[in-house]
Amino acid sequence: MLIYGNEQLWTGVDADRLAELIAEVNAFNAALRESGELVDSRGLVSWPRSVRVVEDAPVVTDGPYLEAKEHVGSYFVVDVDSERRALEIARSYPALRHGGGLGGGIEVWPLMEPGGSDL
């Protein structure tokens, strides 16, 4: 699950509200870890590098240069029995409930099984 956010909104939130949100996310992660469903969860350090082919050669630039106000700020990996459960978890992510667009959004991506047999 890729967690999107808007850096301008995050840096503008007051300290008490941010501390409340962080506590909620920590409790969310702890509950998933306790259930055995959380495999990994980490924030991503800004800014990424983009590698693209330009004139048949890979070129590294500051990235990602998406034309969007939101970017991937963190991710978490869950091991669940169904897509339905994955979507339940995504819908319950605490930051989604914070107003003003602070919560951004979440994309749910199934991971490819070793060997790529699920293509």
Image: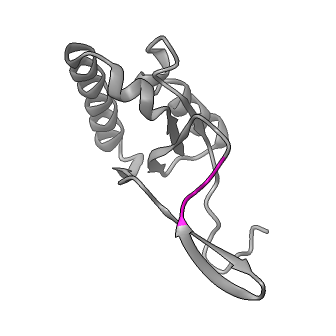
Q: Is residue 29 above or below residue 43?
A: above
How far across and down, in percent of the image, does residue 44 sit? 38, 52
> Which residue lies at the image location 35% right of the left edge and 51% below the top edge?
42
> Quadrant where the N terminus lies?
top right
Q: Nearer the viewer, residue 35 or 14?
A: 14
State the colouring used for the structure image.
Answer: one colour
Vertical comparison of 9 with 68: above or below: above
Is 63 one of the magenta-colored residues? yes
Residue range in magenta is: 62-66
* Viewer-closest of 118 and 94: 94
**Which of the 4 image quadrants contains residue 64?**
bottom right
Q: Residue furthest bottom?
A: 56
Residue 88 picture location, percent across and down = 56, 29
Left or right: residue 100 compared with residue 10: right
- 22 is within the stretch colored magenta: no
Image x and y of residue 5, in percent: 49, 34
Q: Is residue 100 above or below residue 39?
A: above
The single residue placed furthest to the top in the displayed view is 99
Overall secondary structure of the magenta section: loop
Horizontal arrangement in the rendering, residue 11 relative to residue 60 (left or right) = left
Q: Is residue 17 left or right of residue 108?
A: left
Give the residue drawn at x 65%, y 35%: 84
